Image (tube, rainbow, N blue to C red):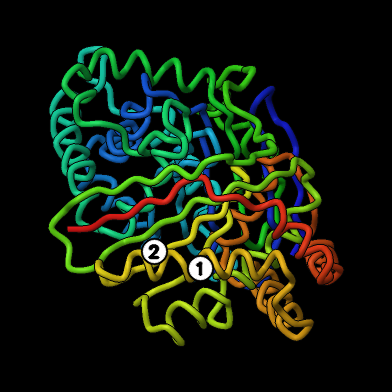
Amino acid sequence: MEYNQIEIKKGIKLHTIQTNKFKTNLIAVMLTTELSKENVTKNALIPMILRRGTQKLKTQEEINKKLEEMYGASIGCGLEKTGDNQVLKFYIESVNDSFLPQKSENMLKTSMQMLLEMIFEPYIENDTLKKQYVIQEKENLKQIIQGKIDNKSRYALDRCIEEMYKNEPYGLYKYGYVEDLEDINEKNLYEYYKYLMDNCKIDIFVSGILNEDIKTMIEKNDTFNKLNDRTPQYIMPEIKEKKSEKENTIQDSMDVNQGKLIIGLDLDFNQEDLRYDTMIYNSLLGGSANSKLFQNVREKASLAYTASSSYLRLKNNILINCGIEIENFEKALNIIKEQIEDMKKGDFSEVDIENAKKGIIDAIKSIDDEQDTEITYFFGQELSNIKIDIKGYEERVSKVNKKNVIDIANKVSINTIYFLRN
């Protein structure tokens, strides 16, 4: 696997991943813009509109027919919240030309053209977005937003983040808000779409057996050539020291059979290099089946159906996630706090550290097993402006020792305790 990147216009980068492991090419285009209450709902709506039709393929039926002609290629879109940014993702996967029964068509070039048209040449009717599409997708987005309560674990996690980052961009729900949908129409959404396309950060990823000059292919593409140079309007992540002096406790009531306990931890450091130590700390605390939370809260005390933790590197937080019997709230909370304190005392072994390292390194080694995972990995580096290859990543993780982990443990403080109960 060989990774390269180059800026092909100001604010627009091309990333190529040369790999012989797959019979498909995967092209992904990421549009990154800063999170804001004003635009979060519009950003969520735009990919849903764009997938409905292009200037050449005006309906979903026409798009599907074209994909069938491309030997069953697939195209789609998604939305992520990454740090204080919203990322609109578009992708197309198609058979590599080397495996086609005939060489009459350059499948990579055709795929690139189709994806760029979907993003940058939407179906326009009466000099604006198609009204019917906007109405229908507003209703679909409304259902997505209202449906967030259906997954109680995810809802509790989002609510904890909302409380931890109240009145800050990261506290926003990535799909936006129902109350903002009412004022969105085909005209003002189109005006915002044009602004977004001129100001967002654009990253184009191409993964597969690349036997041609991708840069030249894109530079000769008429759709791409309509894009302007730009100074991207997005937030470069910055690790900030955080130390909570007071725990903020929030309880919500809902019709639930199982309580959802989320604890948001702050990390009091701003050195990027400490993220590797923090990965090991998180693995020992709740990031694996051998972790202290899993073993002590779930297995020994039988207080939780689930007990885990995850590390939000771009925000310098760790989130503990437990599903518990509602009446066990105080018991579970006390045992979780004991595990946090035990980590500060170094109550874990060298064997525990080596097992944590092995799990993380195994995950790193599997990055190139999936094309979309590779792209996600390199895109994460692009957004954080931290460049390290997979081998270097493994080496840095392998250097973490017990003292490093204890140092991290003593930089941890509880920010928010969120409990969803009936």
Q: Residue at x 68, y 36 (%)?
A: 240
Q: Amino acid at mark 2?
A: Tyr
Q: Position of residue 11 (x, y in %)?
A: 65, 25
Q: Position of residue 50 (x, y in %)?
A: 32, 34
Q: Residue at x 17, y 41 (%)?
A: 140
Crowding at dot 2, Cα within 10 Å, few <14 / some 14-19 / many 20+, comes out as few
Closer-to-camera residue (16/366): 366
Q: Which residue is mark 1?
A: 100
Which structural element holds mark 2?
loop
Closer-to-camera residue (287/42): 287
Q: Residue at x 53, y 64 (%)?
A: 337
Judge whether 4 appears above or below 14 on screen. Answer: below
Crowding at dot 1, Cα within 10 Å, few <14 / some 14-19 / many 20+, comes out as some
Residue 191: name its quadrant.
Answer: top left
How many discs mark residues in the rendered view?
Answer: 2
Quadrant showing the N terminus: bottom right
Is the residue under label 2 in contact with that under label 1 (CB below 8 Å)?
yes
Q: Position of residue 145 (x, y in %)?
A: 23, 41
Residue 168, label in figure: none
Which of disc 2 and disc 1 is earlier in sequence? 2
Q: Residue at x 33, y 65 (%)?
A: 329
Which structural element holds mark 1?
loop
Closer-to-camera residue (210/120): 120
Q: Amino acid at mark 1?
A: Leu
Q: Which residue is mark 2?
A: 71
Judge whether 266 appears above or below 235 on screen. Answer: below
